[in-house]
């Protein structure tokens, strides 16, 4: 859960995560409440949006309500994303 706090500034509640996954609605709520008035808020908003895209479009699975937390560490070093090899 430390990756969630680092990326979104919030810790998901017990109903928002289970077995290495986090509820998609929780991530969207975190994204949508960001004020985007300072650089840190803008980065958290972008992290949440990219995480949603990774979990629902790029690496989608049968789940339509949760995102796999294994992709979250990729977003922690935001300034290196452009150097990643995405396949």
Image: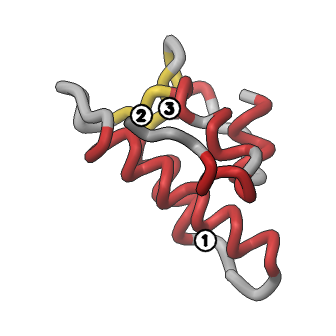
* Residue 32: % across, % down: 53, 70
* Residue 66: % across, % down: 37, 33
**Could you say which quadrant of the image residue 61 lies in?**
top left
Q: Is residue 74 above or below residue 32?
A: above
The C terminus lies in quadrant:
top left
Q: What residue appears at the point 49 percent right and 48 percent down from the top-left corner?
A: 51
Q: Secondary structure at mark 1?
A: loop
Q: Which residue is mark 1?
A: 33
In this rendering, would 81 be left or right of 5? left
| Residue 15 visible to the viewer | no
Q: What residue appears at the point 70 percent right and 67 percent down from the top-left corner?
A: 43
Whether residues under marks 2 and 1 lie with C-beta atoms below 8 angstroms apart, the answer is no
Q: Is tag 1's residue or tag 3's residue first in the polypeptide sequence?
A: 3
Real-space Cα separation, disc 2 to disc 1, in angstroms: 19 Å
Q: Which residue is mark 2?
A: 67
Towards the viewer: 51 or 10: 51
In this rendering, would 35 be left or right of 17? right
Q: How many marks overall?
A: 3
Q: Secondary structure at mark 2?
A: strand
Q: Is tag 2's residue or tag 3's residue first in the polypeptide sequence?
A: 3
Real-space Cα separation, disc 2 to disc 3, in angstroms: 5 Å
Real-space Cα separation, disc 1 to disc 3, in angstroms: 17 Å
Q: Secondary structure at mark 3?
A: strand
- Decide: few, some or many residues near mark 3? Use Cα within 10 Å; few <14, some 14-19, many ≥20: many
Towards the viewer: 48 or 22: 48
Whether residues under marks 2 and 3 lie with C-beta atoms below 8 angstroms apart, the answer is yes
The mark lying in front, picked from 2 and 1, is 2
In this rendering, would 3 be left or right of 38? left
Res. 22 mark:
3
The colour scheme of the drawn protein is: secondary structure
Towards the viewer: 6 or 30: 6
| Residue 40 visible to the viewer | yes
């Amino acid at each position: 859960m430390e990756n969630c706090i680092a990326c979104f500034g919030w810790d998901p509640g017990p109903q928002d995560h289970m077995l290495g996954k986090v509820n998609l609605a929780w991530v969207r709520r975190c994204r949508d409440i960001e004020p985007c008035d300072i650089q840190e808020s803008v980065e958290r908003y972008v992290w949440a949006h990219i995480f949603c895209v990774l979990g629902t479009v790029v690496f989608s699975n049968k789940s339509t309500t949760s995102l796999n937390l294994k992709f979250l560490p990729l977003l922690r070093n935001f300034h290196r994303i452009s150097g990643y090899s995405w396949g």
